[in-house]
Amino acid sequence: MPNAQKAILVIEDNAEMLENTAEILELAGYNVFKACNGKEGVVLARRHLPQLILCDIRMPELNGYGVIRALENIPEMTGIPFIFMTGKVEKADFRKGMDLGADDYLSKPFTGDDLLRIVAARIKKSLHSNERFDGQQEYVNRDMDQEKIQQDVMLLTDQKAIKKLRKKDVLFREGDSPDFLHFIVSGKIKTFKSNEFGKDYIIDIHKQGDFLSYAALLEDSKYRESAIAIENAEVALIPGQEFFRLMRTNSGVAMKFVKLLCYNFSESGDKLLKLAYDSSRKRVAEAIIFVSKRYLSDGNSGLFFALNRENISALSGISPESVSRNLSNFKEEGLIETRNRNIKIINQGKLESLKN
């Protein structure tokens, strides 16, 4: 049978539920260990190192939360999928379980099909992490499966709380402490710093599919910039603990975020050089092209996109008056067209040449 070597630990204080769950898994070919309470479950987990753990939440002596806390301090248990089973479906209980590091949730009563589907999916996803632990250095040194890494990264965003922002709503402020990794589901967010005189400098404009906050989380520091929605947006809130757990157990994901950090560092250096040495004409051209790439997908050039002179000023580090002069010049030269605080690039090639 295909699942014969896949051991599962079931921890459940209800004898009937324990036997029924074990029977379904055994019929599917899994090797099942059974524990009737949390303490026994921790002992069996350490002894057998199962490939997956199913655990009830409400149990005497040591409940499900206590079990997962006990196991997270055991190095050998790192990366083993943990699924809570409970009759409680309140959002707070679900959130607490996931914050503690659970990988999934089964609400009682569940069907045999639900049980087998979730178990098979979680074991399949964990196999790649286990293989990487066996040869982590070899894995890092060879070409990584970028598609698989992207899938693992996107697992972070599954079934997370969504924060809805209206235009100009603040996501976080400079000096706040980070609790979440943020993933932009829709809309756009700008990150910026403000000087002592209240003037803003835009660091970046982030769009759908971008992650925010990972630098502050990894540095264990406060935010060094503020983030605000520049249009209606939805942002997934990923608890920092889940982010760090995947970073520890998945070297490919860790490398992805390291690369993001390196890229952002390089981009910041380039921006500083441009602010120091480029003319105002080059800097305005750079700002227009930068924002167009954030708003327009490939092949959609020549469309209007939102960009006013205040945002160009905040991106380029020059005064709004100087921005206005340069925009007027670009219009006269047939490089751009403006309409109601929106801009359309008419001559992409020439505008690109100005910033180089």
Image (tube, rainbow, N blue to C red):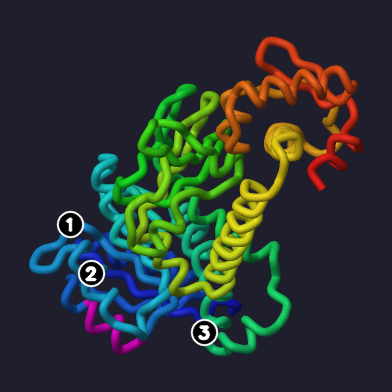
Residue 61 vs residue 187, the one in the foreground: 187
Check disc 3 and report its element: helix, strand or loop. helix
**Badge 3 local density, few (<14 within 10 Å), some, or many (20+)?**
some
Circle 3 sits on which residue?
Answer: 133
Q: Is residue 41 above or below residue 196?
A: below
Q: Which mark is residue 58?
A: 1
Q: How many marks?
A: 3
Residue at 75% in and 34% down: 281
Residue 114 in the image: state x and y as whole percent.
Answer: 47, 52
Residue 156 in the image: state x and y as whole percent.
Answer: 48, 55
Q: Which callout, 1 or 3, points at the residue further toward the start of the chain?
A: 1
Magenta stretch bounds: 41-48
Residue at 46% in and 69% down: 247
Q: Which mark is residue 151?
A: none
Type of the residue with mark 3: Phe
Magenta stretch, main secondary structure class: helix
Residue 140 in the figure: left or right of residue 235: right
Q: Which mark is residue 69?
A: 2
Check disc 2 and report its element: helix, strand or loop. helix
